[in-house]
Image (spheres, rainbow, N blue to C red):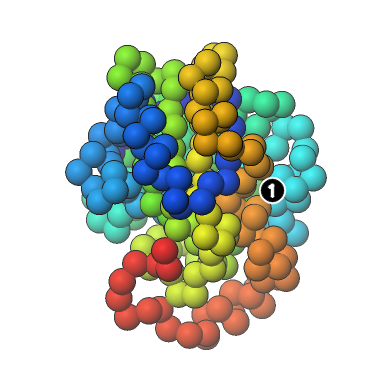
């Protein structure tokens, strides 16, 4: 079962928008310092799929906290990597406190997801792991969800190429490609989008993540590829691109979406 034990729970995170043409050059640079993430090692282009279901209130509290630069903001999302019934779904809280990112997440059994999103309190049997911290993370998620009456708002997908330190989890570099989003108001875990929209046009998102000081070789990478830092929040940018009106009125939007076009017959989301 995927647990992503090497994820940093507290870190600094810098993001850059990059053209797809830089990917090969970045990969050549990164492999001299890091090793490819185990989940991408046998995947095409070293990239594995990432799916997220973002929750927000009907007045989009977490979205507005992000675009207003609120000091101690957070996001609520469900993250998963495939459509297999036995695979867990991670309930994630991603907080920003000043310049530091803190993440809590707990793996949940798929059959328990609708129950928890309906507002019920999590029990140990709902979890896909026995670590007590997992239950604490899901309990905290449900508390925040119920406080702002959050419910599903958007489905997000991309393919992630990740590079990690061979020694510890102090450094992680990711390249997210083909980032798409669409409104989604049901507690369903889709791996195909109905009408996806590209969030950053033809550009990818590079993320440099570290737990201590900014490594000197990160500076060399930024200079070599002439990178410009960017606040690339996938959910917030997606809502801005599509328009807040697509997400505000949950009931009306849900009905309009439910009776809209059918899902694509086959194939991955727009890349």
In the image, residue 265 lies at what x, y percent?
Answer: 32, 80
Residue drawn 64% across the image and 37% down it: 229
In the image, residue 68 lies at what x, y percent?
Answer: 79, 45
Residue drawn 24% across the image and 48% down it: 43
In the rendered image, the quadrant that contains the N terminus is top left
Total residue callouts:
1
Quadrant of residue 129 within the rendered picture? top left
Label 1, on which residue?
A: 62
Give the SS element for disc 1. helix
Closer to the camera in the image, 207 or 53: 207
- The answer to whether residue 105 of the structure is visible from this angle is yes
Quadrant of residue 164 within the rendered picture? top left
Local crowd size for mark 1, using a 10 Å CA cut-off: few (<14), some (14–19), many (≥20): many
- The answer to whether residue 142 of the structure is visible from this angle is no
Left or right relative to 70: residue 197: left
Left or right relative to 114: residue 255: right
In the image, residue 204 lies at what x, y percent?
Answer: 50, 50
Closer to the camera in the image, 58 or 50: 50
In the image, residue 205 lies at what x, y percent?
Answer: 52, 46
Residue drawn 23% across the image and 39% down it: 41
In the rendered image, the quadrant that contains the C terminus is bottom left
Left or right relative to 82: residue 137: right
Quadrant of residue 111 within the rendered picture? bottom left
């Amino acid at each position: 079962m995927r647990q992503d034990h090497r994820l940093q729970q507290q870190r600094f995170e810098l993001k850059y928008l990059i053209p797809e043409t830089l990917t090969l050059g970045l990969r050549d640079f990164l492999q001299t310092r890091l090793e490819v993430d185990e989940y991408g090692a046998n995947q095409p282009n070293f990239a594995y799929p990432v799916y997220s279901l973002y929750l927000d209130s009907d007045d989009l509290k977490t979205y507005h906290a992000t675009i207003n630069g609120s000091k101690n903001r957070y996001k609520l999302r469900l993250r998963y990597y495939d459509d297999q019934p036995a695979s867990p779904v991670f309930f994630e809280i991603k907080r920003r406190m000043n310049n530091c990112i803190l993440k809590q997440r707990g793996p949940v059994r798929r059959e328990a997801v609708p129950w928890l999103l309906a507002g019920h309190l999590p029990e140990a049997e709902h979890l896909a792991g026995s670590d007590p911290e997992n239950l604490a993370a899901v309990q905290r998620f449900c508390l925040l969800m119920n406080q702002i009456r959050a419910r599903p708002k958007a489905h997000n997908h991309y393919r992630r190429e990740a590079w990690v330190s061979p020694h510890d989890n102090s450094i992680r570099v990711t390249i997210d490609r083909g980032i798409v989003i669409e409104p989604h108001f049901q507690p369903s875990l889709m791996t195909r989008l109905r009408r996806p929209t590209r969030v950053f046009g033809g550009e990818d998102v590079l993320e440099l993540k570290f737990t201590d000081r900014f490594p000197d070789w990160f500076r060399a990478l930024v200079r070599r590829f002439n990178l410009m830092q960017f606040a690339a929040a996938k959910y917030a940018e997606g809502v801005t691109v599509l328009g807040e009106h697509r997400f505000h009125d949950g009931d009306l939007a849900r009905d309009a979406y439910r009776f809209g076009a059918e899902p694509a017959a086959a194939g991955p989301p727009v890349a």
